[in-house]
Each structure stands twice: as C-alpha cells, then as structure tokens.
Image (cartoon, rainbow, N blue to C red):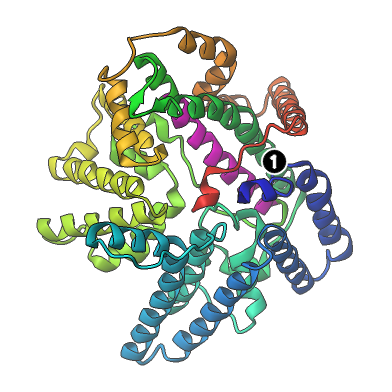
Amino acid sequence: MKGAWWSDKLFPSEVFLFVFLPVVLAVYYIFLRKTKMAKNIFLLVASLFFYAWGEPSYVFLMIGSILFNWLFGILVDRFRGKKIVAKLLIALMVIGNIAVLGWFKYSEFTVLQINRFLHTEIPVPIVALPIGISFFTFQAMSYVIDVYRQRGKVQYNPLQVGLYVSLFPQLIAGPIVRYETVAEQIEHRVENFKDFSAGVTRFCIGLGKKVLIANNMAVVADNAFGLIINGEFQASVGMAWLGAIAYTMQIFFDFSGYSDMAIGLGQMFGFRFEENFNYPYISRTVSEFWRRWHMSMQTWFRDYLYFPLGGSRVSTPRLIFNLFVVWLCTGMWHGANWTFIAWGLMYFVILTFERLTGLNGKNYWWGHIYTMVLVIIGWVIFRSTGMGNAFLYIKAMFGIGAKGLMDKAVWAYIVQNWIYFVFAIIGCAPIVPAIDRKLKENRIWQTAYAVGVMVCLVVSVSFISNNAYNPFIYFNF
C-alpha cells in the first residue's frame, strides 16, 4: 500500500522531523538567505524530491501538469483580448486537466459500472492513484483561471509555476492554495522570526492533532466499522454510535491537523496560506458546517464552478441544478465510489432544503443537534466501503439489526480512550483561542501555552517513535 512506503517520509515521521525539514530549513536560511530566486529554486527541488520519494514515477506526471498549465497560462494571457480564443483555451485547459484526473481516479470505477449494468466484459484498467492528484490538479487549474481573470500575473518562468503547484507543505492533502493567494508571495514574501515561531507552534499543534487524537480515534472507528460481518452488525447500538463519533473526530483532527502543519510549514518559509477549518462542529446548520469545513475546497468550487454556472442569482430550478452539479462534483472529487457520490448528493438535498426554506439563516437552539446528527450519518456513508455496509451501519445506529443497546466493548473502548475523547471534544470548540485572546499579555499563560506546545511535540514524537502510524485520510484524494 502507498501509505506503507510513504510512512517514513511524511510530516509525522522521524525522517521528516529530524532529517528532511531541518536540512531544508538550514539550507534555506543559512546558505540562501539573500537570494529569493535561489530560495525558490531550492524549494522547488526539495518539493519535487519530497513527492518523488514516495511517487518516483508519478513525479513526472506532476511535472507534466505544471508545464501543461504553465503553457496555457501564457497562451491565455497572450490572447486575452480575443475573448472567444481565450475562453476556448480555458475550455481546453479544463478538459485536459479533468481528462488526466478522470483517468487516474475514475477509469477503473467507470469500466466496472459499465460491465455491471450493461453486462459487458470490457477489460478493467488497473490504474494506481497518484497521491494528492486532486489537490495539485485543482491548484494548477487555479493558476490558469486566475491569470485569465487577472488575479495574479502570468509567470513566464515555469519554475515559478512549479513552485506554486508542488510546494511540499500543502502538496499532498491541501489546503487547496489558489494562485491569487500566493502570486505575490512567490517573489516578494518576507520571512521574519515572528512568523517562523508562529509557524513552528502551528505545526506542533497540527502534529498533536494527527498523532495523539486522530490516530487513537482511528483505532476505535476501525474496530467499529469492522464489525459488519456476513451482512450483519455484530455489536450494540452504543458501539455503532461510538464508532461513528470516533470517525467524526478522526477525520476532523486528521485533516485539520494536516492543514495546521501545512499552514505552519508555509509560515516557516514566509508563505501565508488561507485557513482550511473554522471549528465546523460548533455549527447550527449544515450550511454553516460547510462554511467552516474544508474551506479551501468550498471556495474553489464556489468561485470556479458555482459562480460560473450562475450562482444563486438565478431562478429556483436553475439554483437547484447549480447546487446539484456542485455537490455531485464534490462527492466525485473525493473518490470513485458510490459512497462518495451518495455523500455528496445527501448534502445537495440537505443544503437545497435549508436554502429554500430559509433554515440556513436561522439559529435555533436545536440546530447544533440536528446538524451533528446529519454530519455523523454523512461520515458513516463516507467511511463505509460500500452503500450496503453504510445502510447496515446506519440502521444499527438506530437499533435495527444491532445486538442490544450496549455491550462490554463500548465501556472497554471508553475506559481505554476517554482521555483522547476529552481532548477531542475540547479541541472541537474555540476554547483555547478564546482564552488566548483574553490572556495573551499574561506571562503565566504565555509560559503555560509554550510548555503545552512543547509537551505536545515531545509526546507526539514518542508516539511516532513507537510506530503509532496511521496514513492521512485525504492522501486518497
């Protein structure tokens, strides 16, 4: 599996923490501190090396994507005055990128479905999925579109485009950094100690989220979802809910932890990436949840798909169609499986209902319960290997087919992991940031915060040293 051969080089690994990152930082700040172009070339080489270590053949695919979109960026800029030609170039660029993405992500799934429904025997292509292809493809498309919209200048040097697409902090699992966000930073960013130290702190917090919370939640979730045997859920209602809640925590701390590490690493090198999460589990509507969850993906689909389709300033039937397209694409972006499509369409139905009824702008006391129940059910569909297993698991959550209300395994998992659940619940709400804002001038609090970050780092490294490895969920996308 890819996760196994990448496990020695990713952020939560001894090789990355104590070899790759220190070497890159040392060269960047000691030997290249006065030359921006040299820094950019070095970061590009380091980023390509980072990707090639795990994907030695597919690094050429990424380089090809960089050169393809770099060329289209120049063509679009050159023919900007001829709108028909420029729009044709944009269309060809999108088709080219989506064709490559579609081949690697959906060719096997598509042929399997054709054979299944049409009873054909078309040979099924076995295509290995390049890690992070959805992320770097969307970023490459963002470059050309932003150049067309004049939200960032065209780059005649392909190395600059290469750095934007391949920058190792956010290369594998985001956030999806849009070109307009970093266009000026590529050549004119300013590094300073304040940003560097803030970046180190952010990285340590993200590392703790991933290693200490997400990985331990994964143990509970994996065991619970593995209890579907021979078409039955072999445990209690309590176990079904515990596993679903554990996965809800796992995917949040896994992905937000990676985003924190990526944003922190970017700060270390003078880049400022946009936030990707804003405490989504405190939301009171599903619409609010999606304004807070994976924000870089949501704004990408909004600006590059939803708005071009007409956005919300259209008739009701057209609005429903626009939402359908966006959420179908959102589901498909996550992978080639009916569970992802169903998950995306589930949110299409819910968000359409909220928008048409005005519920998306309300703030009812029961809103948080309603939202979290739907989000948890959504994560069950997302996590399941197939729609059959998803239905079995959801039915067990509501007492259909489960083995009683509670069992000993539930209490055993709670006793073994209660401390991780406590920190997970605390981490889902902006409690620590609120305290930090009030006491940011208090030296005792500052000292306690710094000690807490150091303890988080030390404990995380000790877990990593004991091989407590679990691959990032979003590497598959």
Q: Is residue 249 magenta?
A: yes
The residue positioned 31% from the left and 48% from the top of the image is 344
SS majority, magenta: helix
Side of 464 relative to 29 (left or right):
left
Front one among 397 and 21: 397
198 up-or-down from 394: above or below: below
Q: Amino acid at mark 1?
A: Pro
Provide the secondary structure element on which disc 1 rests: loop
Q: Outermost residue, right direction?
A: 31
Side of 18 relative to 384 (left or right):
right
Q: Which residue is mark 1?
A: 12
The residue positioned 46% from the left and 30% from the top of the image is 247
**Residue 218, horizontal then vertical, whole percent:** 54, 30
**Residue 369, horizontal then vertical, whole percent:** 30, 23
Where on the picture, by quarter, is residue 357?
top left
Q: Which residues are magenta?
A: 245-267
Crowdedness near tag 1: few (<14), some (14–19) or many (≥20) residues, C-alpha within 10 Å: many
Front one among 425 and 173: 173
229 up-or-down from 404: above or below: below
